[in-house]
Image: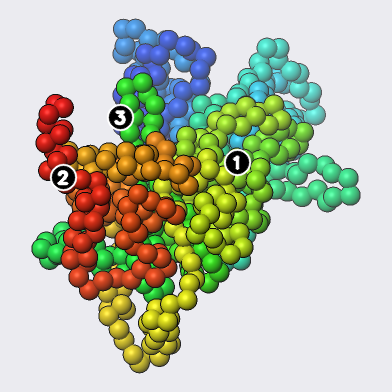
Amino acid sequence: MEKNTEDPGHWKKPMASYLVRHHPDQLNSIASSPDPNIHYPLHIDFAELMEDDHRIAHLLFAQPNTYLQIFDDAALWAHKIVLGDMEEGVEKKFIHVRVNVCGSPLECPETFPSIGRVRVQHRGILLTLKGIVIRSGAIKMHEGERKYMCQKCQSSFPVYPEVEARNAISLPSFCPIQRSKPCGGVKFQYVENTIVCHDYQEIKIQESTQVLGVGAIPRSILVILKDDLVDVVKAGDDVIVTGLLTAKWSPELKDVRCDLDPVLIANSIRRINELKSEIDISDDLVTKFKQFWDHFKDAPLKGRNAILRAVCPQVFGLFTVKLAVALTLIGGVQHVDASGTRVRGESHLLLVGDPGTGKSQFLKFAAKLSNRSVITTGLGSTSAGLTVTAVRDGGEWMLEAGALVLADGGLCCIDEFDSMREHDRATIHEAMEQQTISVAKAGLVTTLSTKTTVFGATNPKGQYDPDQPLSVNTTLSGPLLSRFDIVLVLLDTKNPEWDVVVSSHILSEAEPDKTNNDEDLANIWPLSILKRYIHYVKAKFRPVLTREAEIVISSYYQLQRKSATDNAARTTVRMLESLIRLAQAHARLMFRNEVTRLDAITAILCIESSMTTSAIVDCIGNALHSNFTENPDQEYAKQERLILKKLGSIEDFTDMNSMVD
């Protein structure tokens, strides 16, 4: 380690040797590229570097400001070595070593702090932060280097801008070339045509609200991206950034104290959108899932109900709502046709109900089940807060992501949906169906991804009138209602028998000595296991509709189209897509890769509960009073007979279809 104190440049040769030995493919690819003026990244793994030479790894971590620049010089040296062995190749001017710390000791909580825990002690070391991009600035041209010449010794040396001084360049007090005997009291002259410019972009990342406690404000930090790192992330992306923590003076504002703001100069940035929902699922847990379904092989609906009881266990009954929540969270399979048109796989759920029916409880529990979720209320949300906001920072307009963009790949819960203004509700139409948000604000025109499940809750307008359409009772427009796959109405009607059952359940829960079957079943499927189960079936299964299921769904859709009067807003092609999504979700819930008649009938029952009037008689009743039956298979058989009787026997459909074929 002594040679480090003498001259850091001594490490250039071992660094170049490491790159030649461990990354020849990347060096060959860079040498083969035709453009010499592009900035090329060379990715290295910090864990691999530690195994090969822990001294270089330690210096890189402790003094990145010095040794990252030396590593870049070593990369150019290694590039020339590789280039000498190639028949064809172009010498490059700019190569940057990008350090990946994932899987290394730098990823431990002590050196991988949350943004809110960044302190002065982290300044000057190689720091890794994880967060969501909430703001993305414009790409600018930035002067990164210029050369000056000492008039005494006629030696030239580079000078770099200082972030702390707002990227201003300051000259040294003595000549840095003559180390043993510095040239003092001399002037430095700028060398013409030696300015090196870089691409420059500022983004802001914010820590995830998932890891914060109640009342904690999510903190954010400015991140500076240069050269090949610019324009690789956008607002709403989950990222892991590794870089050097420093500070810069905040903008000068009248009557405002000027402070140093923390800023991270990025060395590498990685989008982890594809890893948003990654949860560690062990092989033992998968085996338990399979054993569970083997146990309920003869009575699969009993097994399904055992899982559904674990959905929001603090709320008694409400079987229909718990089934709808589970199917919404699991979702269907995304479909892309030959023309590239994408049909969403995510389902949307709206709960319409009287006060005290447990709507907010379901919203909060669903947010816990989702690995990425955002909860907001309609009263405190504007269209800008839900979609995207144009903000001005230092004279420049930037886009700041709203709730739907931040929930991309997860769940967005909107409570008090009726409190939103009509204009604000209209802004989420595109986000729910096309799963994008098109923005044209302050000269910024772009499209952001909102591949999210929307879970809304609202109160009816005054007393709910069953004789009126849903759009009248909720004051929600038809186009918006048609985008929800399931709309459940929870009416607090007088039912003495139900009141007795619910009151006895709540009183028994209040006594700690008493136990009941619901608690035992909840212990089988705790929140952590249920969360892993939902993630596993979403990732593992891509159910395909059987011919039988297709006929049932098609027949029900045609029947609804013929008889639709009050539900015209709901009985559109979107309802057909909703039926397919819900049937696929139920097949996933049942641990299957095939959509059977059972799944199709269950999807129809869910859609039926969304209808105020229907061609099929009401076989479910008030969703609020729907309870778990002791024999679900027998109950399902009765409902299936009723639905098939209305649609026509399945044999008739099969014969008719074979005649058409």
SS class of the residue under badge 3? helix
What separation in Å lies between label 1 and label 2 (alpha carbons)?
Answer: 41 Å
Mark 1 vs mark 2, foreground winner is 2
Q: Quadrant of the C terminus?
A: top left
In terms of sequence position, does the residue under pointer 1 or pointer 2 come before the other? 1
Which residue position holds label 3?
A: 21
In terms of sequence position, does the residue under pointer 3 or pointer 2 come before the other? 3
The answer to whether mark 3 and mark 2 are in CB contact below 8 A is: no
Q: Position of residue 3 (x, y in %)?
A: 48, 40
Residue ID at (32%, 48%): 582
Q: Is residue 490 above or below residue 20?
A: below
The answer to whether mark 1 and mark 2 are in CB contact below 8 A is: no
Q: Position of residue 357 (x, y in %)?
A: 49, 69
What residue occupies the far right of the structure in this picture?
A: 255
What separation in Å lies between label 3 and label 2 (alpha carbons)?
Answer: 67 Å
In terms of sequence position, does the residue under pointer 3 or pointer 1 come before the other? 3
What residue occupies the far top of the structure in this picture?
A: 88
The label shown at residue 106 is none
| Residue placed most toward the observer, 567 or 625 | 567
Which residue position holds label 1?
A: 426
Asked if residue 531 shows in the view, the reply is no
| Residue placed most toward the observer, 495 or 300 | 495
Residue ID at (28%, 58%): 533
| Residue placed most toward the observer, 274 or 456 | 456
* CA neighbours of label 2 inside 10 A, class few (<14), some (14 to 19), many (20+): some
Residue ID at (35%, 59%): 618
Amino acid marked by disc 1:
Ala
Amino acid marked by disc 3:
Arg
Which residue position holds label 2?
A: 650
What separation in Å lies between label 3 and label 1 (alpha carbons)?
Answer: 58 Å
* CA neighbours of label 1 inside 10 A, class few (<14), some (14 to 19), many (20+): some
